[in-house]
Image (cartoon, coloured by chain):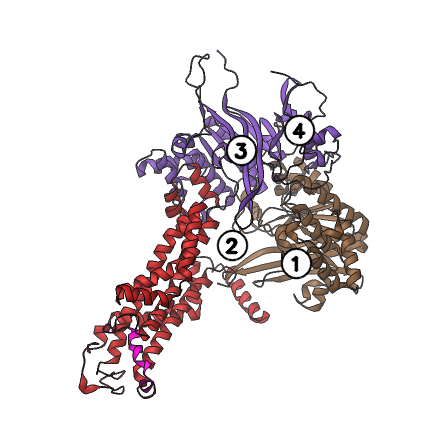
Chain colours: A purple, B red, C brown
Amino acid sequence: MTKGPEIILTVRDLKTHFPVRAGIFKGVVGQVKAVDGVNLDIYRGEVLGLVGESGCGKTTLGKSILQLVKPTSGQINYHESRENDDNVDDEQNVLELSGLTSDELAPFRQKLQIVFQDPHSSLNPAFTIFGSLEDPLKQCGFKTRKERRQVIGDILESVNLRREYMDRYPNEFSGGQRQRIGIARALSVSPELIVCDEAVSALDVSIQAQVLQLLIDLKEKRKLTYLFITHDLSVSEYICDRIAVMYLGQIVELADSESLYRNTLHPYTQALISAIPVADLDKKTTRIVLEGDVPSPVNPPSGCTFHPRCHRATDRCKTEIPTLKRYQIDGQEHYASCHLIEHEPVVG
Amino acid sequence: MSQSTLDRKFDRIRELEEAGRLGGTRGNRALRKMLNNPLALVGLVIFSIILLASIFAPWLTDHDPSKINLRAMLQEPSAEHWFGTDKTGRDVFARVLYGGRVSILVGLGSALLSAAVGVLIGCYAGYKGGWIDVVCLRISEVFMAFPQIILVLLLVSIVGQSLSNLIIIFVISGWGAMFRLSRARMLSLREEEYVQALRSFGVSTGRICYKHILPNALGPIMVNVTLTTAMFILAEAGLSFLGLGVPLNIPTWGNILNVAQDLRVLQNNWWMWLPVGMVISLFVLSVNFIGDGLRDSADPTQQG
Amino acid sequence: MSESSEMNDHDLALRVLNLKTYFYNDRRCNKAINGVSFDIHKGKTLCVVGESGCGKSVTASTIMQLLPTLSRIEEGEITYYSDDGEIRIDQLERNGEPMRAIRGSEIAMIFQDPMTALNPAYTVGFQIGEMLQYHTPLDKKQVRARTIELLSDMGIPLPEQRVDEYPHQYSGGMRQRAMIAMAMACNPKILIADEPTTALDVTIQAQIFELMDTLKREHGTAIMLITHDMGVVAELADDVAVMYMGNIVESGTVDDVLRTPAHPYTQALLDSIPVLGRGRGQKLKAIRGSTPDAYDRPIGCQFEPRCDHATAQCKSMPEEVGINISHRVRCWHYEEISRND
């Protein structure tokens, strides 16, 4: 009895737009189309990377999934775990998260968690570690203080920190330790999916490796799924199973990490990969230098939003919006959204 | 500070550091900075003297501040009456001491109460944003735009003069400033990541706002409370001087000053208004020094 | 004392010898840089690489004499080789005439955050123009013409329009270009860039590096590039200096340091970063422990608590040793490291 890759979360046509207000009466004059039509399936147990530059919408997408930011339209469906389910033919229990109120959302808060980027503002400086980690546990039903201290102690040990640290204040810890405490906080409620929002970007290079290793170990031990948001392609190549490249609120390419580098399809991904400085003297790549700046999500260009900066743009690219199509390359699923791809898309 | 004085300070610090003599206590840096600030220390000393003198008034003087003694009117300061007597023979020194109790109570009480009201509303409005914030902001602007004296006259004519009414009036005219301060702090603090983390766990708005964010916003608020205290003491003095403040039968610093409306008193009976005026000035000055010291101690660019 | 390479002396732009800068905050003494020596050659890029707290930014501030009030240069020499001879920068008064004449026109600096490095209250043209007016004898019309020329050289489109715009009307990448334009306005001999692209997107970063490379080739500017990114070092550096907790632990050409690292820290750093293109199989080795507190430094070699090769000897600070004519290292056990490679 084999189970195929199990889905934990699906995102359908998600759009998160923020109104731009101007004038005395703060009328709405435009929309920041942070996330502009995203379709995504996240498989249980994988590390899915969300990669892109500033303004691409990756952080907004992560927060929209967690309902920390209210999406404007679209569906987010959470699929319950089938671990204890012996019968493969049963329909997975699917719950739609998008329409729920705060109260209805409460039980899912526990399953979907987030780790933030900045170790200096992710912990409340006025409270001890115990004080900061206590409230979420109260929310999840740990009634006695003794229980909570036990859980927090355990969770600190699982991120390689000592139990006694729970009575200290955040300013007594280094950046790397604070980040580990942030991870511990997310883990304390036993989640299934963790959104890592640039979780290692603000750390020193030598500490990044420690925290990455920790994340990998925890994923194995606790059967977690990660949505790993980063602007650093080198890190995502290392830790992610699949990577989605975002540009101006849309996914332009999605493939498993090896295929993304070996068989890059989208011109933006090509430019991104070539632009990254590589710490290896023998790997000199010819750099594709993009013209111009990253455009603003308020006024995205017509047609393919990448066409103004694309070194291969044709007339069709200026008028016709490309869609994300599925391709089969070297036996792997590979999605890309571009008019100039030579492969045949797979239908179905 | 000139370069050579700095150099000498640096040399001293370097010697101590290399001998390993520094870095023992991780004590409160802010406190240490406060204690090293001479003006703040002076302020603290003066403030304490005046405050304690008012509290321990019965031990410092046998005279009853309200006891009228028509045989001892308008006496100059003497061994018997350290600040002399007033028009009805009351001992001025006793009046200043007991009056201090009321004045400080009005000043501190109003400051704390208006802080409480302002902070409560400001935190919530600042955190929630949206129309609640806009409405509260407009209301606070209306209150702040009202000239205090008009408000006092209005309320005094409606509900009459009393100590508690005065405090109420001060709170009504003063909560707006605290509201704006705490709202401003809230606007910047609510974007901190630990707040987002709490929201991701589904913790309620009230708990996030009052339990988690508020302790971080208290710093500037506390400084402001000290400065507002000084402001209200001056306000009370001014209003009582005009006869609009605390009813004249209760001694306060302002009420004592009330007699100075009369030009003859000003010219001939200096002991009735000069000492109390000085006490008010000293007290307000000391509170300002303390407030400045608190503000400086939180400033990392000053040498500590 | 370090050995200087005799053959390269004639193209030296700056020489730093045994520099020590100490900070005095909160009545504590922080030895931010504790004996640092390096050379910057004309037409070459020196990358100073290290993590937070290593003192690389302080080195830049010291050279520019832009240190905060509560700090000073304790010891050491900074010698600038100008057209008129050698100038000892460490002996100049911070805000005196001679230093201000050098700062900006002969040695220029660009900072990390382009958002805050430009004054939002004045137009970009005004700010660049100010530099030109102070350091050159050009008149107003010439200044404006030169400003527009500079903006165009730095790749800013529509410079005649952009010269009258405010920083907030520029994008991040353009602001950085504007800052580089301001720095290059007087054709400085040395350009110090303190993490110039850390706050920028990767594709914009690539543009800025192209620009800096062009400047180096066309004007012969000596560049001192401060970064924490080993990838940037591999792409741009001619020479490298690796810093850790106030010391240069290893220096040499980029081939010396990246191909045959001799210091455990350099080796550990290279082993702990994921390299694009090596795939998921690459083994990352994290450096254990964390950077010590600046006020609670280890005795002797600063890296000793975290080093896998540490012995009792490491409790005393190692001397700087020359492995070959350009490659220097500060470690008792450098031979082990080089052998293991």
The chain that hosts pointer 2 is C
Q: Quadrant of residue A343?
A: top right
* Mark 4: few/some/many CA within 10 Å (<14, 14-19, 20+): some
Question: Of residues C167 and C194, which is closer to you in this image?
Answer: C167
The chain that hosts pointer 3 is A
- Residue denoted by label 3: A213
| C146 lies left or right of B140 | right
* Mark 1: few/some/many CA within 10 Å (<14, 14-19, 20+): few
Per the model, the C-alpha gap separating discs 1 and 4 is: 41 Å
Q: Secondary structure at mark 4?
A: loop
Per the model, the C-alpha gap separating discs 4 and 2 is: 58 Å
Numbered circle sitting on residue C214: none
- Residue denoted by label 4: A321
Question: Of residues A257 and B268, which is closer to you in this image?
Answer: B268
Q: Position of residue C56 (x, y in %)?
A: 63, 51
Per the model, the C-alpha gap separating discs 3 and 1 is: 47 Å
